[in-house]
Image (cartoon, rainbow, N blue to C red):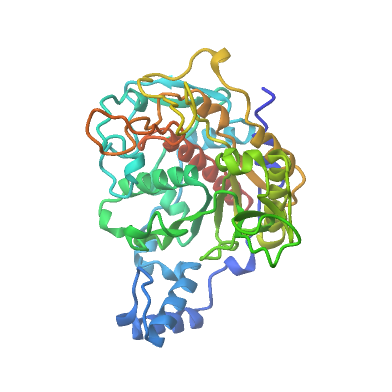
């Protein structure tokens, strides 16, 4: 099908890759010095990065962040690491992984499987936002959990949380984007947490109350020395407060969107081991849709600019940043496609609904058009020098009108008259399958790297 273009971006220069010198283990002297520094200052160390007036505390936090980028951060001892079994697979599993290289895993169908089980039981994960926790919010049905994604041309390996954690040992994975990427981020953290015997060994770095009000959040898997972070950046480029004395033209006050500037982050992430970007839903926002006095380049605020042209400019800014700032020999870059919404009878805050949906769309004629946002993304990625793996979830989400929170986006008792959410997804739910495909892709990359070495 014409809309499935992911394979081009999957293999174009992506595999195999060589190890960058900065990824090699630090010298023993440097490691011992830094570990000694952490020990001496450990009493002032705080995992929630809370402010401290102590200079020693600041040095300790800086040292710990440096160690996070290396295997030395892991609390696992050398003896424990030596007992960690190698990432091996049976002959059958190895063949499944090899077959992924010639398969479009995003071209498939949802198959009813009464034996299917989500990677974490409903209501079991304490890390979910209430807005995604349909079980906690008393959604009465669970049929939407009994479908699994099956690619047409191959099989995908069974999801193994412990194996994925070993793939991520000593690494930093960062999700950058809007709340749909947060949906996926929380799904992955809960899936990996469920695989641990001691679930207290994973925790939120920042305070729980800060989750919605600040842009940087991180979960730490202590025994694997890895973190899985989320950075809120719904446009990827920078929203800006307007100041009439500074601009050549435009409204005297209000927000503008800097199409030529990546959003600043409280936590630098260009040198993370894995970065997963997304954007799309906010480009249908009323400000971006009408395009009046909102889009900005340099000191110039456009009186009117078509949203498609604006998105193209923003994505080219993103592509330029990735090509210039990200070292592809040590960092893998992913981009998650547009996740479908299923409002009927109106849109967000205008009476749109999706409650009562109990099964996926089965008639192809009822599936929506391929998102215009992703066509623009694909044209931009085709011109990039950095290999980007395209997690093209757009089509697979089009079918799943049954998986949204709808009325169950909050704990309010019946009768439920709240605004419905037909954009995000219940957790556990559909984003678990996105992470299953992400896991399959990382296994393929590991297999290629191991073969080339």
Task: Note whether 131 is above or below 152 in the view shown.
Answer: below
Figure quadrant of residue 1: top right
x, y (%) of residue 423? 46, 34
Could you tell me how many numbered marks the image carries? 0
* Relative depth, front residue between 331 and 241: 241
Quadrant of the image containing the C terminus: bottom right
Q: Residue at x 30, y 39 (%)?
A: 410
Figure quadrant of residue 426: top left
x, y (%) of residue 371? 62, 31
Q: Residue at x 54, y 15 (%)?
A: 366
x, y (%) of residue 451? 60, 48
Task: Note whether 246 is above or below 133 in the view shown.
Answer: below
Q: In this view, which residue lies farthest toward the left?
A: 413
User: With 363 as the anchor, is 205 left or right in this view?
Assistant: left
Is residue 434 visible to the viewer in this orientation of the structure? Answer: yes
Is residue 14 visible to the viewer in this orientation of the structure? Answer: no
x, y (%) of residue 25? 53, 70
User: With 287 as the anchor, is 225 left or right in this view?
Assistant: left
User: With 323 as the anchor, is 281 left or right in this view?
Assistant: left
Task: Note whether 271 is above or below 97 in the view shown.
Answer: below
* Relative depth, front residue between 372 and 291: 291
Q: Residue at x 61, y 51 (%)?
A: 333
* Relative depth, front residue between 124 and 171: 124
* Relative depth, front residue between 171 and 451: 171
């Amino acid at each position: 099908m014409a809309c499935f273009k992911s394979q081009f971006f999957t293999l174009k220069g992506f595999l195999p890759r060589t190890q960058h010198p900065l990824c090699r283990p630090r010298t023993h002297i440097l490691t011992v010095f830094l570990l000694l520094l952490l020990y001496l200052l450990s009493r002032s160390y705080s995992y929630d990065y809370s402010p401290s007036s102590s200079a020693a505390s600041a040095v300790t936090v800086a040292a710990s962040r440096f160690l996070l980028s290396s295997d030395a951060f892991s609390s696992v001892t050398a003896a424990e690491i030596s007992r960690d079994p190698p990432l091996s697979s049976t002959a059958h599993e190895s063949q499944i992984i090899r077959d992924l290289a010639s398969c479009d895993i995003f071209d498939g169908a949802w198959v009813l499987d009464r034996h299917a089980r989500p990677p974490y039981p409903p209501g079991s994960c304490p890390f979910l936002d209430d807005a995604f926790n349909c079980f906690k919010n008393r959604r009465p049905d669970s049929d939407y959990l009994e479908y699994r994604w099956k690619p047409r041309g191959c099989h995908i390996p069974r999801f193994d949380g412990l194996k994925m954690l070993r793939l991520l040992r000593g690494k930093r994975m960062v999700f950058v984007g809007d709340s749909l990427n947060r949906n996926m981020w929380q799904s992955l953290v809960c899936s990996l947490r469920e695989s641990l015997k001691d679930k207290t060994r994973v925790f939120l770095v920042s305070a729980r109350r800060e989750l919605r009000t600040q842009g940087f959040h991180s979960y730490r898997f202590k025994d694997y020395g890895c973190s899985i972070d989320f950075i809120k950046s719904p446009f990827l480029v920078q929203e800006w407060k307007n100041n009439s004395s500074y601009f050549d033209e435009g409204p005297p006050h209000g927000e503008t969107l800097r199409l030529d500037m990546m959003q600043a982050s409280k936590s630098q992430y260009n040198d993370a081991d894995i970065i997963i970007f997304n954007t799309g839903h906010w480009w249908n926002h009323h400000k971006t849709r009408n395009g009046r006095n909102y889009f900005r380049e340099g000191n110039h605020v456009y009186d009117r600019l078509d949203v498609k042209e604006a998105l193209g400019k923003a994505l080219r800014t993103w592509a330029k940043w990735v090509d210039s700032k990200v070292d592809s020999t040590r960092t893998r870059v992913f981009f998650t496609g547009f996740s479908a919404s299923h409002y009927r009878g109106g849109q967000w805050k205008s009476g749109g609904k999706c409650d009562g949906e109990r099964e996926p769309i089965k008639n192809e004629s009822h599936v929506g058009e391929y998102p215009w946002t992703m066509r623009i993304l694909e044209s931009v990625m085709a011109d990039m020098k950095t290999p980007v793996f395209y997690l093209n979830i757009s089509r697979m989400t089009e079918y799943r009108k049954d998986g949204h929170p709808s009325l169950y986006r909050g704990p309010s008792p019946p009768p439920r008259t709240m605004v419905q959410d037909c954009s995000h997804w219940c957790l556990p739910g559909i984003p678990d399958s996105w992470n299953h495909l992400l896991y399959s892709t990382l296994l393929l990359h590991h297999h290629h790297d191991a073969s080339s070495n």
